[in-house]
Amino acid sequence: MKTILMMAITADGKIAKHATQLADWTSKADKKIFVEETKSAGVIIMGKTTYETIGRPLPGRLNVVLDQTPDTSKNIPGSLEYTNLPPKSILADLAKRGFKTAILGGGATINGLFLKANLIGEIWLTIEPKIFGEGLSLFKDADVNLELELIEVRNLDKNVIQVRYKVVK
């Protein structure tokens, strides 16, 4: 299964000022490509904090929410699933159900879990023309030393680009 980490970052590499910041700082172009790509994949994986920041399942795709103590009574078949399975088991389950690609949609802790398990195949970063100075990095709790190979650079808008990398394993 192909796993793509898809995040918007500031020019100084931050994904948010703090864990509960809304993604209202990202451009319309980023939101548009995020919706297109996550719907195309059919599944997005995120952490509980990211999900609670959004506040609802993103329509038109399966939302998998990682939570240490998942409340599966909140699950909505085909739309929302809470889990505490390890990343490899989540991807194996999704592959069994016919998904070919999964999008990691954050946050930094979940990104770090998938990185530690060596399960990220591509990293797509939308670089927004903002600088936060301080804030959350792409990965948390992970010793990062990745080699990347550039796949593509896209101009999404006048001031917004997306870079797509393959993780060299």
Image (spheres, rainbow, N blue to C red):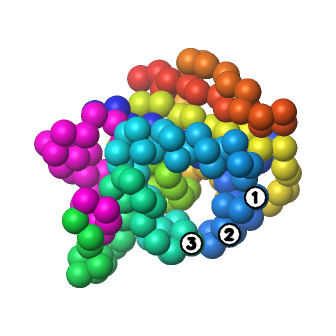
Whether residue 61 sits left or right of residue 137 in the image: it is left
Is disc 2 in contact with disc 1, using a CB cutoff of under 8 Å?
Answer: yes
**What numbered label is drawn on residue 103?**
none
Residue 143 in the image: x percent, y percent?
A: 53, 45
Q: Magenta segment: does it hold 80? A: yes
Q: How far separated are the C-alphas under marks 2 and 1?
A: 9 Å
Residue receiving disc 3: 53
Q: Earlier in the sequence, mark 3 or mark 2?
A: 2
* Viewer-proximal residue among 76 and 125: 76
Q: How many marks?
A: 3
Residue farthest left in this picture: 96
Above or below for 44 versus 4: below
Indicate left or right for 61 with 151 as reference. Answer: left
Q: Residue 25: give its label.
A: 1
Which residue has dot 2 on it? 21
- Helix, strand or loop under label 1: loop
Q: Amino acid at mark 1?
A: Trp
The type of residue carrying mark 3 is: Thr
Quarter location, residue 160: top right
Which-is-in-front pick, marks 2 and 1?
Answer: 1
- Tell me how far mark 1 sits from mark 3, CA to CA: 13 Å
* Res. 124 image quadrant: top right
Question: Can you say whether 157 is above or below 113 in the image?
Answer: above
Residue that extends furthest to the front in the rendered view of this protein: 60
Whether residue 5 is visible here, answered yes or no, is no
Q: Are marks 3 and 2 in contact (CB under 8 Å)?
A: yes
Residue 86 highlighted magenta (yes or no) = yes
Residue 145 position, x and y percent, is 56, 34
Q: What is the quadrant of the N terminus in the image?
A: top left
Instruction: Answer with mark 1 or mark 3, whichever residue precedes in sequence.
Output: 1
Q: Residue at x 19, y 39 (%)?
A: 98
The magenta segment: 78-102
